[in-house]
Image (cartoon, rainbow, N blue to C red):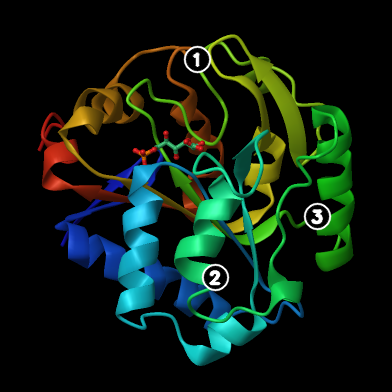
Amino acid sequence: MTEKSTDYGRLLIGDKLELFAEAARLAEAHKAGSDSPNFTWAFTGGSTPGAWYRWCADNHILSTETLATTHFTVSDERCVLLSSDESNFGNAERLLLAPTGVPVEHRHPWVVAYEPEEAAEAYRRTMQLLNPPGKAYDVCFLGMGDDAHTASFFPGSELLENDGEVFFAAVNTPQKGWRLTITPTGLQACGLIVVMTLGAGKAAALKRVLEGTDDLRDAPSKILRTCADRVVWLVDEAAAAELSS
Ligand code: 6PG
């Protein structure tokens, strides 16, 4: 892998399996160096995590200790049933948490049966029970869309301007409807943020985020500049193709 330093965090460029392995290694190393009584690890949605879950489960990548003691959740969610293949937590559970035997009491979905604002409040309370004040997650995985969104911060999102200084919120976006998501304030309260960005479809967005002059509202992943000291981008050659060398 090659490494670059950017204003938005460390950038590691490699092939898919190197990046998959690095994602697991970074999280495991962060856990090994942590004294959190409840170590929390949030996954995200999209196609990349699905492939990563399968690879981790099939190849027994995560340690027995990590699987037995970590509290797992997702950093954003759609307002759908867990049984839906649109459910970010549902997918994590089906593809990784259940096959690897993560204890059910360590699985923390958003409570999507509630109205979105109530669901966000219920989730804030759950995370407050798990975490000391001032912490959102120990490890937060994110992806980036080809429109440069991350988590559920879509272009124009009001959360980028004002998130009410809570760690988790419900947001109604014109394009996507209601989503539940970590907020920019929440990102500030994570120990490690890993952004997996794979494929040629991400190349233009990655260029805009890391090297472009777009406004934050147009390229929401630029929010990661505010916590760059804790961010690692895992990027394949196709996604990195437009970056200057
Ligand atoms: C989601 C996530 C979203 C995702 C990106 C990347 O639930 O879809 O909120 O931010 O991480 O869209 O998705 P891919 O992994 O499919 O590229």
**Element type where label 1 sits in the image:** loop
How far, Cα to Cα, is label 2 from label 3? 27 Å
Which of marks 3 and 1 precedes in the sequence?
3
Amino acid on which disc 1 is placed? Pro
Q: Position of residue 28 (x, y in %)?
A: 47, 77
Give the CA separation, mark 1 to mark 3. 27 Å
Residue situated furthest front in the rendering: 83
Mark closer to the chain start, 2 or 3: 2
Residue at x 45%, y 28% (from the top left corner): 222
Q: Compared to 24, does 192 lie above or below?
A: above
Which residue in the structure is indicated by mark 1? 155
Q: Which residue is mark 2?
A: 97
For label 2, the SS is: helix
Residue bearing mark 3: 134
Residue at 10 percent across and 38 percent down: it is 245
Q: Is mark 3 within 8 Å of ligand 1?
A: no
Which disc is residue 76 wearing?
Answer: none
Query: Residue at coordinates 76% horizontally, 74% vertically from top-left?
Result: 105
* Side of 186 where 97 appears, left or right: left
